[in-house]
Image (tube, rainbow, N blue to C red):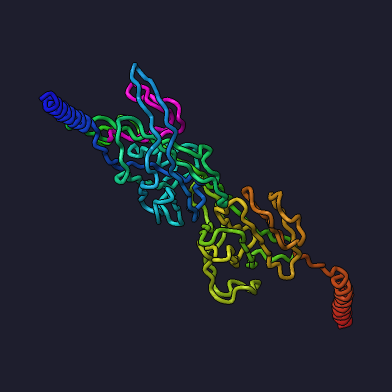
Amino acid sequence: MKKRNFLATFTAVAVAASMFSAAAMTADAANTYIPTAGGTTSFDKYLVMDENANVPNVSFEYTVTAGKAQTFSANDKTIAVYAGPSPEKIAFSGEDISDETTADSKFEIAFAQGDTTVTQAAKTTDETNTDNVKNLDAGEKYAKKTAKLDFSEVKFDEPGIYRYIITETQGDAQGITYDADATRILDVYVVNDTENENALTVSSYVLHATDGTITIDGETYGSDGNVISTTNDEDDKTDAKSQGFTNEYTSHDLTFSKTVAGNQGSKDKYFAFTVTIENAVKGTVYDVSYADDNNANTTDGNADSSIKANPNSATTVITAAVTQPAILTVGEDGTVTQTFYLQHNQKIAIRGLADGTKYTITDGKEDYAAAYTTNDDKDTTAVKADVASNITGIAQEVTVDFTNTREGIIPTGILLSVAAPVVIGVVVLAGIVFLVVRNKKRDAEED
């Protein structure tokens, strides 16, 4: 009997314990967050250049990695900062954004010839332009790309800040100065969903420069510098949008001119020039100026863009009508060669040669004596009087002034030898006239 009671009691206790355990598990399950997926955010990429230059063909690579977990305390609040989960699942998109695979957490932003640009003057006068581009000076313009980051495949399972690091690869693209701040911190803010129990929601994204502290609406949350967005509500952008990454493209203009000198120099004669540009990025386009475009920030020429066939008797190099090119396009081998024509006191400007681009200008001097001067301290120091070149790479605004001289010796001795008989002839003629007059007078007196 006692044994039977003991078994019954043990069974009852076991059942009760099981029920208690199940209840506890149910309670635990009820308090577990349902992971939430992220949404989308974006950052801007700017490429600053001189107004003279065209947008170069260049790509910039970025890598997204998990940030370092930290704890921040602000206004008696403690906000956990977690390492951002699954950076390889972030998808990247946008115009000229390349993301063949997200598994490597990398993507590229490409710029190319023909991309739209905004000048510094337009930026300051257009009230609708909210771009905040650092290092943008007078006489400069910029091209802009926007990278969209999609977190829909990334899951967040606790409230807090989830930190990612976006790093720009410091490359060696020609003429490019990379952003001194190679990284940006992207924080994803996850909070409790006030409308759904045990649910979470992403409240905002903040892009900034460092992992220090940032103040938003009077509360310190994480980091300072370059706030991109603090709300998903497009109608409530309380923080001004500012730059993401900014790079600069440095270029220079090449101007060459012609002066004709000497007593036999023809000042309406056209001379041919051969210009070769090397070590350039294929597809690069250079504007060529033949006239003033009334823009104080550009370099201008003052030559004829169109020349008729056989323009004058002194010109031997133009037998058919010529239209001088408005642009030069670099070929697959990184070079472009073009013939130009100049008269006395004319010049041509080729705009936007990137740092490191090489050039050679050959003066078709014909039977003239050639010489030139230049301000390029990397010039080959006049190895040939009719060839100016920089074989190490352009690094400044360059002017090359060619002078062609042709002198003729006036044969003054021949003129004197001709003059002597003339004088003698005049004297003889005068004598003849005198004799005729005297004879006529004598004959009249005899009559």
Quadrant assignment for the C terminus = bottom right
Q: Residue furthest top?
A: 76
**Residue 166 x/y as whole percent:** 44, 41
Question: Is residue 426 left or right of 202 when viewed as pictured?
Answer: right
In terms of image quadrants, where is residue 347? bottom right
Question: Is residue 415 left or right of 365 when viewed as pictured?
Answer: right
Residue 349 visible in the current orientation: yes
Quadrant assignment for the N terminus = top left
**Residue 123 x/y as whole percent:** 40, 40
Question: Is residue 256 left or right of 232 when viewed as pictured?
Answer: right
**Residue 121 x/y as whole percent:** 43, 40
Judge whether 235 appears above or below 308 on screen.
above
Residue nearest the observer in this picture, 294 or 118? 118
Residue nearest the observer in this picture, 403 or 187? 187
Q: Give the residue drawn at x 45%, y 27%.
A: 212
Look at the image and give the residue range highlighted in magenta: 202-228
Judge whether 346 appears above or below 241 on screen.
below
Q: Give the residue drawn at x 26%, y 38%.
A: 35
Residue nearest the observer in this picture, 375 or 412? 375
> What is the number of callouts on the image?
0
Q: Give the residue drawn at x 29%, y 35%.
A: 157
Q: Residue furthest front?
A: 1
Residue 434 visible in the current orientation: no
In terms of image quadrants, where is residue 415? bottom right
